[in-house]
Every structure is written in structure tokens, then in C-alpha cells.
Amino acid sequence: MTPGLLTRIALVAALTAVGAHLRIPLPYVPLTLQTGVVCLAGLWLGPRAGSMSQIVYLLVGLVGFPVFAKGGGPQYVLEPSFGYLVGFVPGALGVGVVAGHSPSFLRACLAVGVGLLIIYAVGVAGLFLNLRYVLASELDAVSIFHLGLAPLPKDLVVGLGAAWAGRRLGPALPRR
């Protein structure tokens, strides 16, 4: 791994933190720009380095730096939205695998769709477990599912922007 690649991994981890703080607070799952950065991680860095950037982001937040939407620290694993953060790692991996080295806009859009599917699958599962077993919520599974998918329309729009940016700016950030 080259110093340049390590720098790009750190840069994308930092951009994910910035995306966390550009948010609209909602109950349980705030609206942020993080998913767009996660998709860019996979498009710009590829599957391995893209997912590594999200591991760095998670570790920095769990150590205690306030990089998550509501702060940081090990107690953040008890937040209802933590499952989405865990989903960032396989989400960036999925985007990078589907996109390949030089994706067309259509392939980048498909890659972003796969990444969002992965993020939401992990995130909604985590939300369900948190609301049921940590917060002892009486919401039924269907209500939790709908609540967990509430940010999806915003993420689809942000994902299109990420696909466009990944296609346009990708050559400026070589993967290797």
C-alpha cells in the first residue's frame, strides 16, 4: 500500500465525517450526506481501499472522536442508526466491485444502487435489533422497516450525484 493510497483512504474517511455533520435531524435515523461519500469511496478507491476508508471512519468514531452524526465513542454502538454505519464497510466494497476500474455512468449508477441496497439491508436490520432489544420499542416490524427506509429517496438522489461525481472526478484520483 503506497503513501498516496493511504492518504486517499484518510481523505475519504474525513469526507465521510464531514458528510455526517451535514444533516437534518430526524428521530432514530438522521438524514446525512454520508451515503454519497461511501459510494464515492467505492467508485474512487475501489472495493478494498474504499471499504478500508470506512473502517478507518468507524474506528475513529468508536475511539471517541465526534465524527458520527451524534458524536462518537464506544457507546455509539447503542444508537439506532449504528447499523447503517456498519453497512458503510460492505456498501463501499459492493460499489467498488460492481463499478470496476473505469465505469460508465450507467454502471456507476448500478454500483451505487448495489451499495445502497447493502447499506440499507445492514442498517434496517440494525435498527430493528436496536429498537426491539436495546430501546424496547413496541413498534412492529413493518413500522420499523418503513422508518428505516425513510431516508432512501434522499439517498437515491445523493447516489445519482455520487455516480456522476465518481465518473467525472474518478480519473483525477487514480486507485493505485
Image (tube, helix red, strand yellow):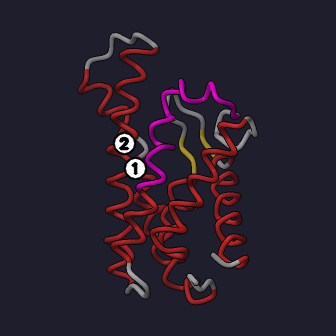
Looking at the rendering, in which quadrant would you find the C terminus? bottom right
Decide: few, some or many residues near mark 1? Use Cα within 10 Å; few <14, some 14-19, many ≥20.
Answer: many
- Residue tagged 2: 122
Residue 101 vs 60, above or below: the answer is below
- Residue tagged 1: 119
Q: Position of residue 93 (x, y in %)?
A: 42, 63
Q: Position of residue 160 (x, y in %)?
A: 43, 69
Does dot 1 land on a helix, a strand or a loop? Answer: helix
| Residue closest to the far left | 142
Please state the total of marks drawn on the protein image: 2
| Residue type for callout 1 | Ile
Q: Position of residue 96 (x, y in %)?
A: 42, 71
| Residue closest to the far front | 1
Magenta stretch encompasses residue 142: no
Give the residue at x 41% y 55%.
90
Give the residue at x 60% y 29%.
76
| Residue type for callout 2 | Val
Q: Distance of mark 2 from mark 1, alpha carbons?
A: 5 Å
Give the magenta-colored segment's residue range: 72-90
Marks 2,1: beta carbons within 8 A: yes
Decide: few, some or many residues near mark 2? Use Cα within 10 Å; few <14, some 14-19, many ≥20.
Answer: many
Q: Quadrant of residue 71?
A: top right
